[in-house]
Image: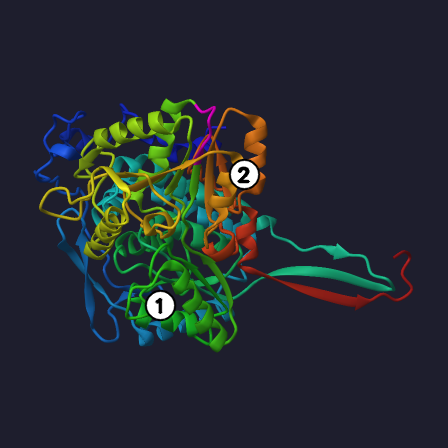
């Protein structure tokens, strides 16, 4: 029962104080009077940053079980979003390194021990790995916060436990994957085999580096595949760290290869490689496969095109969203405000399923708006290593500037800026929690995925109106509904064109719950039993029966 509640750590209870916080969290304070913790409206700078209690030990590519330099010798800087300063220089993979990694993965699949192990043996390696992650969870949480900017409390208390839970879940599946015996119209024995697909190419994003690693690597290994994984260039450090732990757990060389790099080189080379059997993209924003900035849907199209033009490899895509969060007229406004706030601002707004279109019934709109503005003004922003911080910096300067452009667009299109709207402090990539009212459906802030701490509040008058408007988007990743009426909940949950609908909750990410989108939010599903389908192919085996006793 306790294990099943891990996903609730990603709910609004995430920021409740804990007596068991790690020692260095106590260096901050628990109120807005603490130095470095600011109500955004009065902050002038982010001061006295905590030195991360972790060392960066792994910055090279992991190919065939060894950490190696890029063939070109090139490196790229990975930054601390709190300051914009360099944490470390990481080996930069390009097409030659992708070739080396794919060759290692192919050899490990065709000739190595991994696919020939019993499923139980593979399961034990996954479990040993999960145990090692638990042992090193403080270092991993600190590294995730340092490289990504998310609050340490979020990384340590929610994301690391969920990471471990995901690998426990997939370890449990490893020896339960099997085919069927099928009756035929004639004297034949027919069976189906569920076989690993081969070499899987995986591309993960920067907003949840560890969780997305687990979503991809867990099911692929449980099914017996080998992997070449391109970590995001913004956040490569934790993927390299946990890959080292995988080898300590007994994973054979070549089964898991980590190649941090850029989209036009490493990402494109992986997507079009002729010896990759499957490519899977989980990307909330641009992979930079094109010179100009492209949105997540455009990125998915490029990956599909590269896969089709090479060996027609299978593709799974989890892309962007513009999720509606619907507050009905019977809602408890105080609770609805808090949940809508969490649905949008969680992880600095850098969440593909963020409730970024807040639809509020006209009867409660004014009260909801005033309380939402007040809640945003109370949001604590600062050094994510300090206790009590709800919001850290955005990932990098590019995303920072993009968010500010969307805020300017909202103002220019005559939406009302209720609070926020600018930079916080003079260092790093901090943005004030921002709330817009009077938002219309045709405004860019209501149509595009901003991927930042910008809440757009829209008014609706009846259920038919909000269903039509909520579905009037190219996306269909998720939706939220807040109501006390069961009939309303049932109506909306079936009418909304989205892969996940949360009723009176949001961002519940249990290992067993499938996740993925309708329309241009992607192809296929992550997590749960459905994720195994991404890494298996079905073979039918038919054998004649000679004088069978029965058919």
- Residue 253 seen anywhere in this rendered image of the structure: no
Residue 152 picture location, percent across and down: 25, 38
Quadrant occupied by the C terminus? bottom right
Q: State the scheme by which the image is colored.
A: rainbow
* Residue at left offset 12%, top offset 34%: 36
Please tell me which of labels 2 and 1 falls first in the chain: 1
Is residue 374 a member of the stretch shown in magenta?
Answer: no
* Circle 2 Cα neighbour tier, 10 Å, few/some/many (<14 / 14–19 / ≥20): few
- Residue 259 seen anywhere in this rendered image of the structure: yes
Of discs 2 and 1, which sits in the foreground?
Answer: 2
Q: Quickly name the residue at label 1.
A: 267
Residue 56 picture location, percent across and down: 20, 52
Q: Which mark is residue 89?
A: none
Q: In this view, does 285 lie above or below 332?
A: below
Question: Left of 224 or right of it: where is 269?
Answer: left
Question: Left of 372 or right of it: where is 548?
Answer: right
Q: Give the range drawn in magenta.
A: 326-331
Residue 442 picture location, percent across and down: 38, 50
* Closer to us: 267 or 320: 320
Q: What element carries label 2?
A: helix
* Residue at left offset 66%, top offset 65%: 539
Q: Quickly name the residue at label 2.
A: 464
* Closer to us: 124 or 75: 75
* Closer to us: 301 or 159: 301
Q: In this view, does 497 lie above or below 548?
A: above
Q: Distance between the residues labelled 2 and 1?
A: 43 Å
* Circle 1 Cα neighbour tier, 10 Å, few/some/many (<14 / 14–19 / ≥20): many
Instruction: Name the chief secondary structure element in magenta.
Output: loop
């Amino acid at each position: 029962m306790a294990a099943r509640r891990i996903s609730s750590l990603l709910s609004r209870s995430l920021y409740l104080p804990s007596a068991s916080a790690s020692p260095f969290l106590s260096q901050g304070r628990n109120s807005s009077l603490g130095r470095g913790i600011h109500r955004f409206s009065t902050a002038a700078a982010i001061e006295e940053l905590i030195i991360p209690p972790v060392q960066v030990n792994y910055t090279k590519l992991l190919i065939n079980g060894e950490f190696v330099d890029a063939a070109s010798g090139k490196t790229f800087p990975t930054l601390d979003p709190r300051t914009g300063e360099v944490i470390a220089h990481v080996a930069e993979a390009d097409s030659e390194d992708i070739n080396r990694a794919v060759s290692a993965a192919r050899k490990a699949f065709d000739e190595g021990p991994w696919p020939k192990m019993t499923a139980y043996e593979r399961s034990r390696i996954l479990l040993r790995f999960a145990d090692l992650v638990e042992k090193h969870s403080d270092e991993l949480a600190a590294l995730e916060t340092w490289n990504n900017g998310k609050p340490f409390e979020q990384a340590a208390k929610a994301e690391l436990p969920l990471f471990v839970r995901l690998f426990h879940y997939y370890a449990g599946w490893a020896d339960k994957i099997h085919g069927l015996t099928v009756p035929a119209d004639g004297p034949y024995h027919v069976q189906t085999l569920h076989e690993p697909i081969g070499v899987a190419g995986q591309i993960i994003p920067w907003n949840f580096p560890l969780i997305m690693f687990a979503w991809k690597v867990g099911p692929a290994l449980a099914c017996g595949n080998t992997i070449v994984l391109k970590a995001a260039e913004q956040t490569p450090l934790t993927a390299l760290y946990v890959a080292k732990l995988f080898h300590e757990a007994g994973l054979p060389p070549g089964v898991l290869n980590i190649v941090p790099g850029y989209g036009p080189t490493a990402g494109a080379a992986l997507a079009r490689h002729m010896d990759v059997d499957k490519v899977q993209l989980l990307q909330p924003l641009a992979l930079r496969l094109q010179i100009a900035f492209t949105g997540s849907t455009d990125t998915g199209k490029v990956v599909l095109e590269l896969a089709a033009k090479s060996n027609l490899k299978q593709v799974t895509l989890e892309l962007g969203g513009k999720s509606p969060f619907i507050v009905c007229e019977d809602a408890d406004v105080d609770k609805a405000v808090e949940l809508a706030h969490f649905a949008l601002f969680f992880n600095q707004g850098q969440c593909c399923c963020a409730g970024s279109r807040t639809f509020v019934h006209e009867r409660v709109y004014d009260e909801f708006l005033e309380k939402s503005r007040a809640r945003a003004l109370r949001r604590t922003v600062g050094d994510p290593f300090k206790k009590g911080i709800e919001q850290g910096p955005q990932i990098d300067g590019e995303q920072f500037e993009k968010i500010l452009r969307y805020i300017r667009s909202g103002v220019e299109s005559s939406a009302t800026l209720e609070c926020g709207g600018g930079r916080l402090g003079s260092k790093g990539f901090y943005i004030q929690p921002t709330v817009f009212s009077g938002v219309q459906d045709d405004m860019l802030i209501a149509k595009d995925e901003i991927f930042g701490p910008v809440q757009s509040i829209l008014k609706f008058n009846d259920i038919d109106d909000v269903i039509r408007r909520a579905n009037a988007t190219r996306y269909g990743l998720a939706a939220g509904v807040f109501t006390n009426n069961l009939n309303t909940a049932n109506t909306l949950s079936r009418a909304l064109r989205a892969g996940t609908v949360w009723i009176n909750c949001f961002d519940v990410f249990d290992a067993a719950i499938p996740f993925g989108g309708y329309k241009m939010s992607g192809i296929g599903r992550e997590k749960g039993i459905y994720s195994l389908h991404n890494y298996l192919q079905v073979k039918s085996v038919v054998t004649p029966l000679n004088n069978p006793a029965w058919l």
